[in-house]
Amino acid sequence: MDNNVLDKEEGCYDNTEAAFSDDEEEVSNKGKKREFRFHPIREAVVEEPADITPWLDQLDDTMKEKVQGLQKTSDTETQCEVMQEIVDLILEEDFDQEQMSGLASCLSELFKDHFRGDVLPEEITEESLEESVSKPVCLVFRNLVLMQEDNSGFSVLLDMLAEFYQKQPKIGYHLLYYLKAR
């Protein structure tokens, strides 16, 4: 039995010994004052076009056309117009809730660059704050803020944001920023 225990102990432990830092290194570092600064972790940006094809089949033809239009344009103003059309489609009485997940996935993929960058502008002026909340994603926020809670569209937009949050958790911070900056 003791032989068995010995075999287990030998197999469980590495025979190399722990190494500690040299005293000389510690002495040389003690005389220096270390400065700690906040350095945000930057995500490696890989420029690839957004691939939304897996989710497009979940959308009806009208919504699919709008989302593809959003994907094709890079002009912010045009994207905002198309995004408003998408919000209008969501607010229609016959919007199919089954499309919500696919739409949220498409929007999350299309606007991934928006969520990578800094939200707050470098120079804070009235104009720069207005420009920072004039993004296509912010149109969902604007429509939500302008609506009354008893409106049926209010809960549909909240459902949309909840689904979007599942795909892109940073949207919550962007909503808070929008509320504060507007």
Image (cartoon, grey):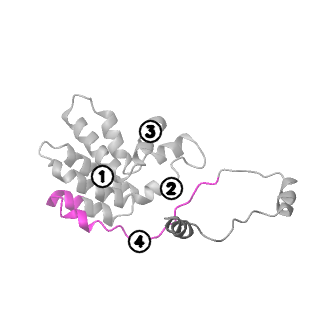
Q: Which residue is pictured at 28% across the width and 53% down the height?
A: 104
Residue 110, x across and y down, in percent:
35, 60
- Judging by the rendered image, the residue that carries numbered circle 4 is 48
Q: Which mark is residue 117?
A: 2
Residue 89 part of the magenta-drawn span: no
User: Which one is in front, 46 or 31?
Assistant: 31
Q: How far apart are marks 1 and 3 (CA)?
A: 20 Å
Q: Which residue is pictured at 35% across the width and 40% down the height?
A: 142
Q: Residue 14 carries which label?
A: none
**Residue type, label 4:** Glu
Of the numbered discs 2 and 4, the one sitting upstream in the chain is: 4
Q: Distance between the residues labelled 3 and 2?
A: 16 Å
**Residue type, label 2:** Gly
Q: Distance between the residues labelled 3 and 4?
A: 29 Å
Check disc 2 and report its element: helix, strand or loop: loop
First to last magenta residue range: 39-66
Check disc 4 and report its element: helix, strand or loop: loop
Q: In this view, does 27 lie to the left or right of 151?
A: right
Of the numbered discs 1 and 3, the one sitting upstream in the chain is: 1
**Residue type, label 1:** Met
Q: Which mark is residue 176?
A: 3
Q: On the image, which quarter does residue 53 sit in?
A: bottom left
Residue 124, x across and y down, in percent:
58, 43
